[in-house]
Amino acid sequence: MGVRIGMTVSQAIGLCPTLVLTEPDPVHYDAVFSRLLLDLERVSPVIEAAELGRVFVGVQGLERLYGGRERQLALIARATGNAERVARAGVAEAPPAANRAWPRTVRLGCARGKFLAWVAASRAKPGAPRTIDDADRAAFLAQQPVAVLPVSPDMQRRLVQLGLRTLADVARIPEPALVSQFGREGRDAWQLAHDRIVEPVIGRERPQPIMVGVDFPLPSADGLLLAHALRKLVERALGHPRRTGWRVLGMRARALLEHGASWMTEVTLKDPSADAARITAPLVTRLENTPPGGAVERLVVEFVDFVPGTASLQLFARDATSTARADQRNALHTAVREIKQRFKRSRLFHIVEVQPWSRLPERRYALIDFEP
Amino acid sequence: MVTPARATVRVDRLRALNVPRPVTVQTSAQDLPLAVAEAVDQSTHHEASAPPTAQRVDTVLESWRIDDEWWREPITRRYVEVVLEGGTHLVLFEDLITGAWFAQTP
């Protein structure tokens, strides 16, 4: 039909009048991506989420656990296939292990260094991982188009205008020439084309559980008071420095009761969140449905499981405007609330025009606090 | 560029962007920059701390001059856009009234 990525809706409908339009569902994408990260963490502890839909998995040292590279790739493929099935079915539970097959849309690439691994993945066919051995690196890189370089669209366009089509063409240009044309981006591009940048995967350790509590001078069984205390404890726990960059997936509320008894409830959020209201709501519901069997002396909230904060990834991802435009505003509001909670003031700013016509650069633009 | 929605801009909350940073510049006989180093702030500089390292200017791209605001406090600057060793682009200007050098991002 000729419908391609980047076309406007009217262009696409012009080419294909029977086109079915599907609204983006960034919350669903986010949930699936979180699930993918969790599944991959079962294979390797070194997981780096580059952006929505792109993950690097560190495999160094996995041989003794799983065996050779093929076996490792099979396990990674299985984990990604799990998330893919969740995405297709729109359910949180994966089918049994016996039904697991190689994923149909996930592309896997295996090479030393993140750039080459990504290029290999982009050249791989779904279901058939592409592995680039050290001996083949130079030849593989040389034939790649300049579009694989992680540089700005403007630089991509100018490279093509200069007649540079492949990384071999880029590698033939002297480094100072690229640097004087493109600055730092030019140097990075030249070094990538020469395979001089081999970045390792940098995994993020999961934070230790965060625990906050409050003692009641007079033991209380008042539901409203306990719900209020839960809200305050969740806010305190969210403000903990260890929580920065992570969303809460699992949490517990515990209470010590009079006469030595105790009460506990455990919640796993369907959509990991860093929003106080979303986290508090299921805890309060549990408190109302199964209240403690006596007056509470001490109430504790504990965040026990986390997933990386992909809301920000989504916000700044390259394809954010096309895939998650609907959710950007919400993500921005959530980010502002979190930052204010953490730092007591907004650290986000608008750029405003002051005298854009001025010949003095410092008079043209200024920053002002962002308050949505 | 994000323009503020409905917000009234209060002048006291504005923070200028791209404020000139004082730098020390070595110049050639033709008055073109050869090397640039961050200027040492005497109020915060400690005796023990290392002096800032000068970066060599790789290429001088272009230069221009601005004479402005002659009706109140005259501004006279000679701008030079350079590429430093390592590829960083930088705009330098010499305040022709005081003789001091400053750096700004292009």
Image (cartoon, coloured by chain):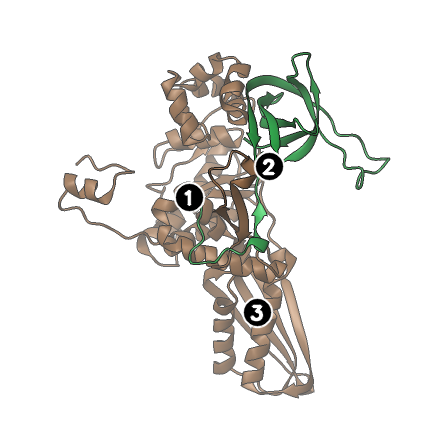
- Amino acid residing under circle 1: Gly
Q: Which label number is shown at residue A61?
A: 2
Which chain letter matches label 3?
A: A
Judged by depth in the image, the label closer to the viewer, 2 or 1, is 1
Residue B82 seen in the current view = yes
Q: Position of residue A296 (x, y in %)?
A: 63, 83
Have a look at marks 1 and 3 and say if they share a chain: yes
Residue at the extreme right of the image, as rendered:
B47
Q: Residues within 10 Å of mark 2 (few under 14, many from 20)?
A: few
Q: Is residue B35 above or below residue A33?
A: above
**Which mark sits nearer the N-terminus, 1 or 3?**
1
Q: Colour of chain A?
A: brown
* Callout 3 crowding tier (Cα within 10 Å): few <14, some 14–19, many ≥20: some
Q: Nearer the viewer, mark 1 or mark 3?
A: 1
Along the viewing direction, whichever of B36 and A261 lies nearer the viewer: B36
In the rendered image, residue A3, in percent from the top left (x then y), is placed at 21, 37
The reply to whether callout 3 and callout 2 are in contact (CB within 8 Å) is no
Q: Position of residue A41 (x, y in %)?
A: 52, 48
Q: Chain B's shade in the image?
A: green
Helix, strand or loop at disc 3? strand
Relative to A278, say whether A190 is above or below. Answer: above
Residue pointed to by mark 1: A53
Earlier along the polypeptide chain: callout 2 or callout 1? 1
